[in-house]
Image (cartoon, grey):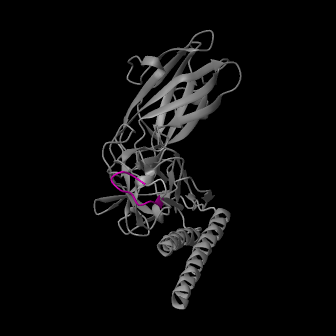
């Protein structure tokens, strides 16, 4: 009987050594989770229970338990490398079969899908037109590398000051080629529907009526409208009213000069509004402090970024950013119940419970660190100590077998001498 008991000890110690060996072998494996060997004592029992004098039948490995503590996060500089700082797993799809991992070593395949080294595709949520994401629908995360479409300028915001002591220009009528026919001028770049840049020039001419200014717009040297828009200021230098070039009232100081059609292209007619509500009339010189317009030209892809909440954006040379999707994360009621599938991936089981999907930074989920990877959580020092402990247990059980063998030899010798 003692032989069998010691044999169970040998088997258990050998299994413990195997688990420890696997931990040490994967101490540098990204996203690997260490395991510990849990033992269970064995007793022979009858319908009436375990005898009070039973010595026991040895030991068995009850479970090889996974430890999902977080590993160290190391910076890599590759924007497609991701680490989860906190709870959660990346969701991977292999032709629709889902698995879960904390190994964030991702790359692009030939279809511009974000994949791991096994070809499994990272799952995400598609963007919506209102800037949010459809968190109810998982899909393959694909990065578009196409150009960013241009946007025609439709609105301009000007922040400037018109000198209060200005008098009407010496020459009349107004001409853009005659500096004596206007007081001040400024220009800015605007864009048509095809992304081509045009120069919009504004000419300000003080009138004989104090506090009233005529404003003309020219695009690429061509008049948008022959008649000017007007700006009227009170004695405090603040804009009180404005009229469009057509003569109609301009609400809130937002002025329209009319429609301009670019020549020599197939671009649509340009119809812009200019907000002069931040243009003051104070003493001092003419000055423009800010000009903002909402158009942009065609953009080339310059890079991909991933935010802490998993929002994947493409950045373009025209300053535009486009949401490509949001990385989906999953969590489980019992992570230790996940089934190991190899390659640092796991699948859900009845023990783990179903996956609860969400986003980084949400309730129960950690944040994503782009350009970083979560290292193995194996503590090499502890693993070496465990190796020594398991080795001692193996040696002790081997010694027990040797001792039992000596006892058996003594019994045989007694029997032979008797």
Judge by depth and name the residue closer to the eye, 181 or 46: 46
Q: Residue furthest top?
A: 235
Q: Is residue 235 left or right of residue 350?
A: right
What span is colored magenta in the figure?
Answer: 41-50
Question: On the rendered structure, is 64 left or right of 267?
Answer: right
Residue 222 visible, this angle: yes
Quick check: 271 left or right of 56?
A: left
Q: Is 332 placed above or below 72 here? A: above
Task: Give the residue furthest to the bottom.
Answer: 416
Residue 182 visible in the snapshot: no
State yes or no: residue 112 in magenta: no
Locate residue 24: give its quadrant. Answer: bottom right
Q: Overall secondary structure of the magenta stretch?
A: loop
Q: Which residue is at 68% across, 64% downward?
A: 381
Provide residue 144's location: percent of width, then percent of height: 39, 57
Furthest toward the front, the residue is 418
Q: Is residue 159 above or below residue 377?
A: above
- Which image quadrant for residue 213? top right
Find residue 228 and report its horizontal and vertical position in percent. 46, 25
Residue drawn where x is 58% and y is 27% of the image? 171
Instruction: From the viewer's side, name the closer residue of 402 and 90.
Output: 402
Give the number of marks.
0
Location of residue 59 with respect to 179 vertically, above or below = below
The image shows residue 294 at horizontal and vertical percentages of 46, 38
Q: Residue furthest right?
A: 284
Picture coordinates of residue 186, whole percent (x, y): 58, 35
Q: Nearer the viewer, residue 245 or 250?
A: 250
344 or 213: which is nearer to us? 344
Q: Is residue 399 left or right of residue 230?
A: right
């Amino acid at each position: 009987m003692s032989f069998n008991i010691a044999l169970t000890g040998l088997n258990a110690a050998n299994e413990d050594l195997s688990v420890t060996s696997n931990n040490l072998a994967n101490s540098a494996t990204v996203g690997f989770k260490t395991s510990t060997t849990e033992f269970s004592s064995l007793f022979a029992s009858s319908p009436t229970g375990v005898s009070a004098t039973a010595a026991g039948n040895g030991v068995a490995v009850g479970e090889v338990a996974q430890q999902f503590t977080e590993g160290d996060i190391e910076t890599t500089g590759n924007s497609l490398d991701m680490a989860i700082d906190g709870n959660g797993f990346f969701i991977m799809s292999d032709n629709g079969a889902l698995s879960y991992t904390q190994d964030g070593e991702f790359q692009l395949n030939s279809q511009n899908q974000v994949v791991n080294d096994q070809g499994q595709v990272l799952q995400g949520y598609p963007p919506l037109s209102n800037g949010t994401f459809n968190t109810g629908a998982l899909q393959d995360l694909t990065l578009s590398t196409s150009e960013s479409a241009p946007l025609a300028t439709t609105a301009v915001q000007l922040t400037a000051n018109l000198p209060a002591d200005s008098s009407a220009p010496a020459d009349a009528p107004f001409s853009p080629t005659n500096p004596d026919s206007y007081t001040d001028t400024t220009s800015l770049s605007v864009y048509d529907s095809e992304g081509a840049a045009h120069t919009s020039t504004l000419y300000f001419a003080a009138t004989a009526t104090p506090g009233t200014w005529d404003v003309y717009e020219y695009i690429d040297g061509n008049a948008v409208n022959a008649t000017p828009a007007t700006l009227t200021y009170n004695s405090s230098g603040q804009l009180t009213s404005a009229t469009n070039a057509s003569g109609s009232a301009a609400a809130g100081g937002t002025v329209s000069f009319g429609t301009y059609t670019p020549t020599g292209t197939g671009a649509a007619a340009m119809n812009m509004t200019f907000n002069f509500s931040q243009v003051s009339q104070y003493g001092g010189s003419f000055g423009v402090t800010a000009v903002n317009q909402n158009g942009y030209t065609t953009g080339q892809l310059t890079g991909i970024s991933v935010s802490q909440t998993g929002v994947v954006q493409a950045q373009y040379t025209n300053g535009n950013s486009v949401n490509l999707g949001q990385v989906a994360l999953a969590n489980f009621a019992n992570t230790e119940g996940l089934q190991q599938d190899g390659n640092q991936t796991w699948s859900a089981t009845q023990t783990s419970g179903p996956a609860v999907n969400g986003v980084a930074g949400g309730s129960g989920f950690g944040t994503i660190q782009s350009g970083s990877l979560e290292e193995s959580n194996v503590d090499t020092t502890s693993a070496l100590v465990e190796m020594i402990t398991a080795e001692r247990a193996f040696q002790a059980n081997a010694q027990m077998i040797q001792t039992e063998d000596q006892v058996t030899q003594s019994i045989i010798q007694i029997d032979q001498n008797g």
